[in-house]
Amino acid sequence: MYLIVDFLLILTAFLFMEFVAWFTHKYIMHGFLWVLHKDHHKEDHSRLEKNDLFSLIFAIPSILLIIYGSVNRFDFRFWLGTGIALYGLAYFLYHDVLVHRRLKLFGDLNTKYFRAVIKAHYDHHRGKKNYGFLFMVPLRYFREEYSKSSR
Amino acid sequence: MSTYLTIDLLVLAIPFLLSFDKKVAFYRNWKYVFPAILLTGIFFVTWDILFTHLKVWNFNPHHLTGIYVFGLPVEECLFFIVIPYSSLFSYEVIRTYLRVHKAVFRKYNAIISYIFIFVFIVLALLNLNKIYTSVVFLLTGFYLFILIRFVRAAYLGWFYISYAILLIPFILVNGILTGTALANPVVMYRPSEIMGIYIFTIPVEDIAYGMLLILMNISLFEKFRE
């Protein structure tokens, strides 16, 4: 029972973080903190970018929740912090490794799902409006990929 | 007559009488108003029964007539009719008289909504050990998210302006209910289930509660009127 609750807490934080990332990306990174995000919208992604500061900023609530939760008998805060951290990891693997290939870690993850979200993110870099990352992506990207006949 | 019933009737009196004035003619909207109030009421009464049962809040019999409906004081059930009625009336009056250009809303609707959603969900998640705090902020944030993202409700701008204005009577009425001007309050909250941040005697959670109550009414009202 407790395991299910803990899992749901992780899942909730994970899902909510996509909303936070989307919101921050759309209204803050492409808003008043564009100065930090600008260097992510150039061709070369290999070196450290000012944009990487955002991962540090997002890590703060995660760290605080994990510390605060762990000294309070690992209550719900610990699991929320863990969910945020896992989102950060997923985001890094998806956005920095799979999309922008900043680390040569994996080969191509050639599934319909990833083709859809990666295409959505490339389109963002080509000037389209969509700001989501892992799943807050316009439905048409998924529709397109899933309607193609499987290879 | 009980204190709580007097408050209910006072809240209803002026909006009801002014419903027949010629410019707004609110009575012509009754066929959309009452279904909206009824549907929202079912949701809120169910929630209220549950929270009363869980002793999240309770009512002081001293201020009640002693008539109970579904285990709730009849005054509390009437609350979910008179507050929505007055709010929808005010919303219509504000829409009629206040001239704001539509472009203003188109520009700020989304950002204002998403800030509310962000703040509400964060408050809910940080207070998951408090039932009222977590439930009310989660529900309000979620409802707002559906309205802005999926319904793409263009009237949200009007809602924000209306709610900002309605906060004045809201604080007055809710202040009295929670004991601002009374020797003992009509409604009492269990301290362990709220954050303990108050506006006068009103738990700050009630701001989101009132928001959801009025928002649900307005969204259904607008849906039926379409």
Image (spheres, rainbow, N blue to C red):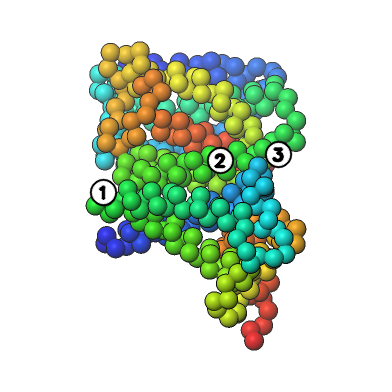
| Residue B205 located left or right of residue A116 | left
- Quarter occupied by residue B89: top right
In this rendered view, identify the residue nearer to me: B19 or B193: B193
| Residue B43 located left or right of residue A120 | left
Q: Nearer the viewer, mark 1 or mark 3?
A: 1
Residue B225, horizontal then vertical, whole percent: 65, 38
Residue that mark 3 sits on: B107
- Quarter occupied by residue B162: top right
**The residue tagged with tag 1: helix, strand or loop?**
loop
Residue that mark 2 sits on: B115
For label 2, count other residues whose C-alpha is less than 10 Å away and answer few (under 14), some (14-19) or many (20+). Answer: few
**The residue tagged with tag 3: helix, strand or loop?**
helix
Q: Say whether disc 3 or disc 2 marks the residue closer to the N-terminus.
A: 3
Residue B163, horizontal then vertical, whole percent: 55, 28
In this rendered view, identify the residue nearer to me: A60 or A137: A60
For label 1, count other residues whose C-alpha is less than 10 Å away and answer few (under 14), some (14-19) or many (20+). Answer: few
Residue B4, horizontal then vertical, whole percent: 35, 20
